[in-house]
Image (spheres, grey):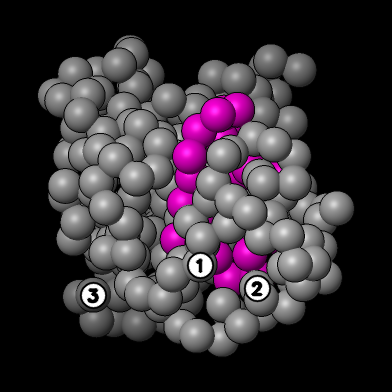
């Protein structure tokens, strides 16, 4: 049986029993193998734009499943273009940049609109991805943090088709900020303090480096970083009050 890291296990945990699934940018194919071995999905489509990851997945299939590949479908191609509308209830897009995830979701609208749940784990720009999702009428239903090695990652569950009410539902009276997920804050995720502390450190470094330049773009970058620090420190203060 394949064993998953904490990050991948939390991602796979958002695929409900009986859901057909797709893992876009499958890399080593661990999530599809896990979903089939544990009887969670009747079939899983594993895709990647590059041949190398699919070759690595083939090795892992042989290692963990042998010749019994029932339920595993491998496809070579970009983004959601490898899927037909309605073919997958849940779609995982993990380990890619937030802006690339936006591009993938926006490029195949018929497929995107047919999916019941997207499970997204951006490597960067989660704030921009979160804002894009809400602006496009996605409902963000859940967010959790997961630690892998020395990094803490955000996992975002989103459903298309919620419309204009999605943003109001998401913030529901909270300050409109995108840098840390509202669900993560409300649920007092166990990794929240570490996550926010790391973000503050990164933004302070950005502000300090930008302050060494006299250019207009550097001044704007410093201003943006300082605003993020202010918001993050407010979140950290609330975390301390809840202890």
Whichever of callouts 1 and 3 sits on the residue coming sooner in the sequence is 1
Q: Residue 201: x percent and y percent?
A: 61, 58
Q: Is residue 27 above or below residue 45?
A: below
Q: Residues within 10 Å of mark 1 (few under 14, many from 20)?
A: many
Residue found 30% across the figure and 16% down from its top: 169
Asked whether residue 15 is drawn in magenta, I would say yes
Q: Give the numbered dot on residue 84.
A: none
Q: Which one is in front, 85 or 90?
A: 85
Disc 3: which residue = 217
Disc 2: which residue = 57
Q: Give the distance between the C-alpha atoms of the residues marked 1 and 3, in whole angstroms.
A: 45 Å
Q: Residues within 10 Å of mark 3 (few under 14, many from 20)?
A: few
Whichever of callouts 3 and 2 sits on the residue coming sooner in the sequence is 2
Q: Give the distance between the C-alpha atoms of the residues marked 2 and 1, in whole angstroms.
A: 9 Å
Q: Give the numbered dot on residue 74.
A: 1
The range drawn in magenta is 8-30
């Amino acid at each position: 049986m394949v064993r998953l890291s904490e990050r991948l296990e939390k991602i796979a945990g958002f695929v409900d029993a009986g859901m057909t699934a797709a893992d876009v940018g499958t890399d080593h194919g661990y999530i599809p193998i896990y979903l089939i071995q544990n009887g969670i999905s009747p079939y899983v489509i594993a895709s990647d734009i590059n041949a190398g990851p699919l070759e690595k997945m083939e090795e892992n299939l042989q290692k963990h499943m042998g010749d019994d590949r029932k339920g595993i479908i491998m496809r070579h191609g970009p983004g959601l273009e490898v899927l037909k509308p309605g073919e997958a209830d849940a779609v995982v897009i993990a380990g890619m940049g937030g802006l690339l995830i936006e591009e993938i979701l926006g490029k195949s609208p018929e497929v995107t609109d047919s999916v019941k749940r997207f499970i997204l784990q951006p490597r960067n720009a989660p704030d921009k991805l979160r804002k894009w999702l809400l602006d496009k009428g996605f409902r963000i239903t859940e967010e959790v943090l997961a630690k892998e090695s020395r990094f803490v990652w955000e996992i975002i569950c989103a459903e298309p088709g919620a419309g204009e009410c999605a943003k109001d539902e998401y913030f529901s009276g909270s300050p409109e900020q995108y840098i840390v997920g509202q669900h993560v804050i409300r649920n007092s995720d166990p990794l929240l303090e570490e996550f926010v502390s790391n973000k503050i450190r990164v933004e302070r470094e950005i502000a300090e480096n930008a302050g060494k330049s006299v250019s207009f773009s550097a001044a704007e970058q410093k201003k943006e970083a300082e605003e993020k620090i202010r918001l993050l420190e407010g979140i950290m203060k609330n975390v301390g009050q809840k202890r």
